[in-house]
Amino acid sequence: MTVKVQLTGTSGAVEVSEQAFDASYNESLVHQVVTAFLAGARSGTKRQKNRSDVRGGGAKPWRQKGTGRARAGTIRSPIWVGGGRAFAARPQSHDQKVNRKMYRGALRSLFSELRRTDRLVVVESMTMDAPKTREMASKLKELELDNVLIVTEAFDENVYLSARNLKNVGIIDVAAIDPVTLLRFEKVLITVPALKLVEERLS
């Protein structure tokens, strides 16, 4: 079974599979995949010094008894100024496991929801003869698109250079699609060849 997606600017439509573009919206799955994606983007390189990393403190500052002061074994104790951290941060991985089936399921949910809410704008093609930001802005204005993600079938340097400086406009190819980027923009402008590649990827 297929569903029809209206082509913007023409009277035609393109048929896509129901499996890829008419799936129910699974909010919990989308949330889990987005959380895992953002967690995987964290560098996890934060590092602090504990008492063994801080320089100095080899000698006991004063004798154990008889001074009237609290016992102290090193001037690099966490309770001293200049001492090490009690629970120092160490480099770690924040990656969360998300299998391929879950990831594709989240993308299916997002693309289906974009189609249902008329936020998926399909055009025949998106090409530029030269990198011209003004021409790209004019094209988007004709389509009444302000906050939009442009999805192309492959990396196009002219399209990328024309769109990269526009406010609230993103540019990406099918191979680099991720759930966080899809959620960041109000609408998604996608070409027919890119739509077919997404359908093939999600079916």
Image: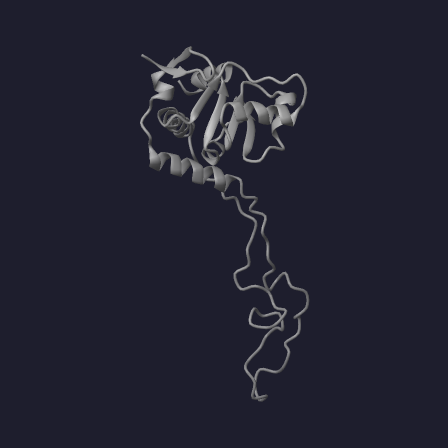
- Whole-percent x and y of residue 77? 58, 70
Q: Residue at x 65, y 21 (%)?
A: 158
Whether residue 161 is visible to the viewer of this picture, yes or no, is no
Q: Is residue 34 above or below residue 202?
A: below
| Coloring basis for residues | one colour
Q: Nearer the viewer, residue 24 or 203?
A: 24
Residue 137 occupies which quadrant of the picture?
top right
What x and y, as percent, mark residue 66?
A: 57, 89
Left/right of residue 134 with respect to residue 2 in the rendered view: right
Count of residue discs: 0
- Is 139 on the left or on the right of 104, as rendered? right
Residue nearest the viewer, comparing 82 with 33: 33
Q: Is residue 155 visible?
A: yes
Location of residue 88 (image quadrant): bottom right
Quick one: quadrant of the N terminus? top left
**In the displayed structure, does residue 135 sit left or right of residue 148?**
right
- In the rendered image, residue 196, in percent from the top left (x then y), is placed at 46, 15
**Residue at the image point whose x is 43% and y is 17% from the top:** 199
The residue under the point 63% across, 33% down is 165
Give the position of the C terminus as an image quadrant: top left
Q: Above or below — where is 197 with respect to 170? A: above
Residue 186 picture location, percent across and down: 45, 33
